[in-house]
Image: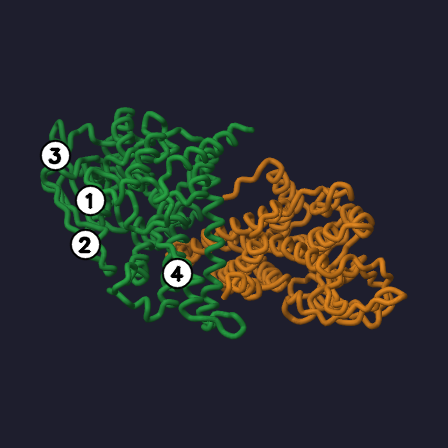
Amino acid sequence: MTDLDTFREETRVWLEANCPAEMREPMGEDDICWGGRSFEFSSPAQKQWLDAMAGRGWTVPAWPKDCGGADLSGAEQKILSEEMKRINARPPLQSFGIWMLGPALLQFGSDEQKRHYLPQIARGEVRWCQGYSEPGAGSDLASLQTKGVDKGDHFEVTGQKIWTSYADKADWIFCLVRTEPDEKKHTGISFLLFDMDSEGVTTKPIKLISGASPFCETFFDAVKVPSEQIVGERGQGWTIAKYLLTHEREMIGGSDSAIFAKSDLISDAAQAIGLDDAGRLDDPMMRADLGKFIVDEMAFDAHVTMTRAYMRAGNELGARSAELKYLGTELNKQRQSLRVAAGGADDLVWEGASNDAGQAAKDWLRSKANSIEGGTSEVMLSILSKAILKMPG
Amino acid sequence: MEILNEDMGLVAESAAGLLNKSHPITAFRALRDSGIALGYDKAIVGEMAEMGWMGIALPEDVDGADFGFRAAGLIAEEMGKNLTAGPFVSTAVLAATVLRNAGGDALAQWGPRIAGGEAVIALAMDEGVKHRPDRIVTTATKDATGVTLNGRKSFVVDGIDADRLIVTAKAGDALMLVMVDPQTAGVSVTSQVMLDHRNAAVVTFDNAIVPAEAILVEGKAAETALTAALNAGRAVLAAEQLGVARVAAEQTFEYLRTRKQFGVLIGMFQSLQHRAADLYCELEQTASLVAEALNALDQGRDNAEALSRAAKAKSARVGRQATEEGVQMHGGIGMTDEMDLGLFMKRDRALTEFLGDAGYHTEWLLRQRGI
């Protein structure tokens, strides 16, 4: 047996022994474990599963051991994920800390910062949110105006962020702040970390068309942020932000992305609409749309597979994360539109007795944000045309 | 995006090297202008054999290279990029895969000749204007003297001047694959020059009698052999079409970077940038799907047929997008014969019809999913 075979065998045995049966059931949005100081576990099994995985460093298997990870190689990570999939194990922990802040700290953080913040993320103890967009800085993010004034041992942060995902539930924020007002817009920004319990921080959820409020307005009124809580150098914030955005886009674009509601589109459509005498969906136009969707979904899944292998081999995705983000989000919008079209009047239902009443309509509405959050599809196409295709201007 | 292992990397490199040097687009243009009906330069068969390409899908005991379909796809993609004409898909992929599945004397006899570049063999299967390999009217009747064939085959790619034809026919309800010498009495082969300046013959069988040994395989085994060949052909042709689309797109992107109007480079215009970037994204995911399909065939995965069909459907759609956007973004100059774009557009159109278009394969995928 090769080392990898041994690793697979041991992983399989350990997962069988340690993954509670409840954590192998299909999961809905409410079953996601986000972690954090005020997180309420939906069951003892959820906490047990988190603690067991975190104990092995497997909530963040690729990270170094002293940062809470397991230092697994690309091949070992693949085996772990295959073995988890084999028993339908739920992800033990999902968070912006894992997806976004972690990679940025590993790249740009000091050794002290890595050893302090990363293990807390890995164990699900601290939940992070991202302070990027502002009312006047959306697609043109680098024009942000939240200011951080140097007061010697701390920065005094004042301003407003918007579209801060789960700011009302987060413990800490990683935040882009203009600390160098005399520099040009891209070089005057710093990357600060601070506690959401700090004096002067307030949040206000924004109600969306789906009825949910995953995003907040976040206000900072002379918040004191200790000087050592800056990541990288002063003025380096945009570089870090761009690096982090590539990870956000990979995350949003991935085919098993947490924000894409999954459903069995084809069998749901067959059930809702029915088949004709020849066994075809009894709606030729929708059938043609579904056919096109099936092919596009297979192409995208293949592309995700290839991209993962490319990254496991040690390549950085860079601007190409925009390609995954664009394709994945447009595909998901297509999926949700087809789903409600197939569901017809059933999927107009907003409130009802059943548990999932209104879910399809809400998922459909939620999906409209996919091609806006993390950079719009139009911004993605502009990035690709300049960075990859070398278009002028 | 796919990371090629060392062997595959060498295949891609040598294909790019040879085709770029000896059979670039200018060579195809010269071939077309010379007006030869065959559609390819006969010398290329020997060259490709020397590279090991003609035997790429054949086992080593019949002089094949046995390198798999991923390798065949890499070669086909380069042929697409360079518009290289030659009987690679017809002979080295389709015929070779039928023979490999049929085995026996026919493989022993014809395998080495294919691998050695001494035989061109075309698959005669379609009968109507669209690819429907299961709609066969051509009959094969067995009797004491051998097998009598009657019927008409259309769109027989590389059928003109072929050494043999592999013909699909119905023996009662069963499928039969028959190896036919086109010189046989009762067989007539009519040359048709197509829009892409390649040749696709019409072949008629009028009480053509071939010996019983000409039967390659029949019944269930014939279906298996034909399906294997078609799946391989689909994925390899998708790779060729991807190559066509990639170069049509690259030439167009280069035009956007250099053409000035209104006092600026037209690549400054966001309406064109976004369409170009969308095309780039589509090409990249098509490349991944094609690679995944070819790998699935080589690994014998259960989903290989679905992936091959999806790859063929996707490459047809994206090939059309690349060539149509290419002509439109070039403007008037894109309509001229002087530019290569028209050649790519014509080849793309033919590749879409060969072994089935997007609608045909999407229909199968819908059926497979139960709707």
> Mark 1 = which residue?
A169
Q: Viewer-nearest of labels 2 and 3?
A: 2
Specify few, some or many for label 2: CA neighbours under 10 Å numbering under 14, 14-19, or 20 or more: some
**What residue is at 74 percent from the left and 41 percent from the top?**
B60
Q: Quadrant of residue B15?
A: top right
- Pick whichever, B267 or A123, lies toward us: A123
Q: Mark 4 lies on which chain?
A: A
Give SS at disc 4: helix
Whether marks 3 and 1 lie on the same chain:
yes
Q: Which tag, 3 or 1, sits closer to the chain's start? A: 1
Pointer 3 residue: A224
Residue bearing mark 4? A334
Chain under label 1? A
Q: Which of marks 3 and 4 is in front?
A: 4
Q: Which amino acid does label 3 sit on?
A: Lys
* Res A271 → quadrant: bottom left
Disc 3 secondary structure class: strand
First along the sequence among labels 2 and 3: 2
Disc 2/disc 3 C-alpha distance (Å): 26 Å
**Residue at (15, 47) in percent of width and height:** A203
- Chain B's shade in the image? orange
**Residue type, label 1:** Lys
Looking at the picture, which amino acid does disc 4 mark?
Gln
Which of labels 2 and 1 is toward the front? 1
**Which numbered tag is attached to residue A206?**
2
> Between disc 2 and disc 1, whose residue precedes?
1
- Mark 3 or 1, closer to the camera: 1
